Image (cartoon, grey):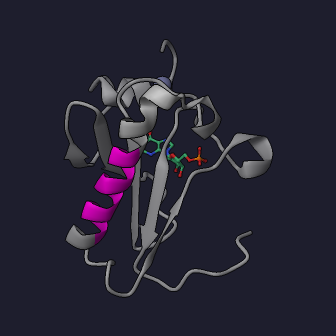
């Protein structure tokens, strides 16, 4: 989608610090990390947010979770635990309107979140 930051990163038009890539999904380190491990997992195709997923995206949504789990292991946060977050809309704190999972780990997370 035109003028979408994460579509441009997925297309390689804007550089990123890549953590994982395949045909459907890209994962890269957040530019402003909120934890020692902070990776974003995005679908390569444009999906605005989790509410825009359709039944045909079931395999893609599962695959995003699978990639997050694989990265949690690789980045060695799987044993102590981690958090996966997807923000939606203004109150949810979403600033980039292209679906992404935040994988956060390497420190103890607070609950409730801010
Ligand atoms: P949101 O606020 O939409 O849930 O998350 C967007 C995330 O994208 C934020 O954590 C922000 O730091 C990150 N971000 C914004 N622009 C860039 C960028 O150009 N490169 C990378 N790697 N991360 C970005
Ligand atoms: Zn996009």
Q: Which quadrant does the C terminus fall into?
A: bottom right
Left or right, residue 100 beside residue 52: left
Residue at left 48%, top 56%?
102
**Dominant secondary structure of the magenta stretch?**
helix
- Stretch in magenta: 62-72
Q: Position of residue 106 (x, y in %)?
A: 40, 80
Residue at the farthest top position: 2
Residue 45 belongs to magenta span = no
Q: Position of residue 63 (x, y in %)?
A: 33, 46
Q: Quadrant of residue 12?
A: top left
Residue at left 57%, top 51%?
86
Q: Position of residue 17 (x, y in %)?
A: 27, 48
Residue 68 belongs to magenta span = yes
Above or below for 70 versus 73: above
Left or right, residue 100 beside residue 112: left
Above or below for 77 versus 61: below
Left or right, residue 32 beside residue 37: right
Q: Quadrant of residue 37?
A: bottom left
Q: Is residue 5 visible in this depiction of the protein?
A: no
Q: Is residue 77 visible in this depiction of the protein?
A: yes
- The residue nearer to you, when weighing 88 against 30, is 88
Total numbered labels placed on residues in the image: 0
Residue at left 54%, top 28%?
54
Residue at left 41%, top 25%?
7
Above or below for 21 versus 38: above
Left or right, residue 35 beside residue 27: right
Residue at the farthest front position: 55
């Amino acid at each position: 989608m035109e003028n979408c930051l994460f579509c441009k990163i997925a297309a390689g038009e804007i550089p990123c610090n890549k953590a994982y890539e395949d045909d459907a999904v890209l994962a890269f380190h957040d530019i402003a990390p909120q934890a020692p491990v902070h990776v974003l997992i995005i679908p390569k195709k444009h999906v605005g947010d989790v509410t825009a997923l359709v039944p045909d995206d079931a395999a893609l949504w599962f695959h995003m979770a699978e990639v997050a789990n694989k990265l949690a292991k690789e980045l060695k946060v799987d044993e102590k635990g981690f958090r996966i977050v997807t923000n939606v809309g203004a109150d949810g704190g979403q600033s980039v309107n292209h679906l992404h999972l935040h994988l956060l780990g390497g420190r103890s997370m607070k609950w409730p979140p801010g």
